Amino acid sequence: MGTLLHLKSLYLEAFDDCKPEFVVILLKIYSMFCVILLSMAIYAFMYRAFTGFEF
């Protein structure tokens, strides 16, 4: 749990004192989009690995 809190603090510190504000919002949306895509890719890989599909 400590690692997740550390990553959260790093994420929030990365956007401190950034201007203009709309760029910060766009970067946060983009980072969430990347997390979603990465989690989908990991899920697809794990699904293929555990159900025995050939690669």
Image: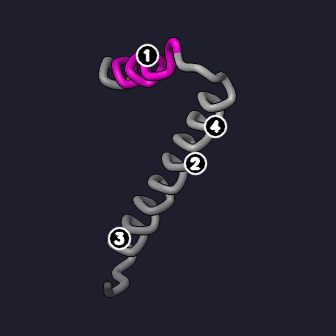
Q: In this rendering, which labeled residue sits more in front, label 3 or label 4?
A: 4
Q: Residue 52's image quarter?
A: bottom left
Q: Residue 29's image quarter?
A: top right
Labels 3 and 4: the sequence-earlier one: 4
Q: Is residue 16 magenta?
A: yes
Q: In this rendering, which labeled residue sits more in front, label 2 or label 1?
A: 1
Label placed on residue 13: 1
Gap in Å between the C-alphas at discs 2 and 1?
A: 19 Å
Q: In this image, 55 relative to 27: left or right?
A: left
Label placed on residue 50: 3
Q: What is the magenta range?
A: 5-17
Kind of residue indicated by mark 2: Phe
Majority secondary structure of magenta residues: helix
Labels 2 and 3: the sequence-earlier one: 2
**In terms of depth relative to the viewer, which is nearer, 17 or 28?**
17
Q: Quadrant of the C terminus?
A: bottom left
Which residue position holds label 2? 33
Q: In this rendering, which labeled residue sits more in front, label 2 or label 4?
A: 4
- Check whether the beta carbons of the residues at disc 3 and disc 1 lie within 8 A of each other: no
Gap in Å between the C-alphas at discs 2 and 4?
A: 10 Å
Labels 4 and 1: the sequence-earlier one: 1
Labels 2 and 4: the sequence-earlier one: 4
Which residue position holds label 4? 26
At a point 33% along the width and 72% down the height, the residue shown is 49
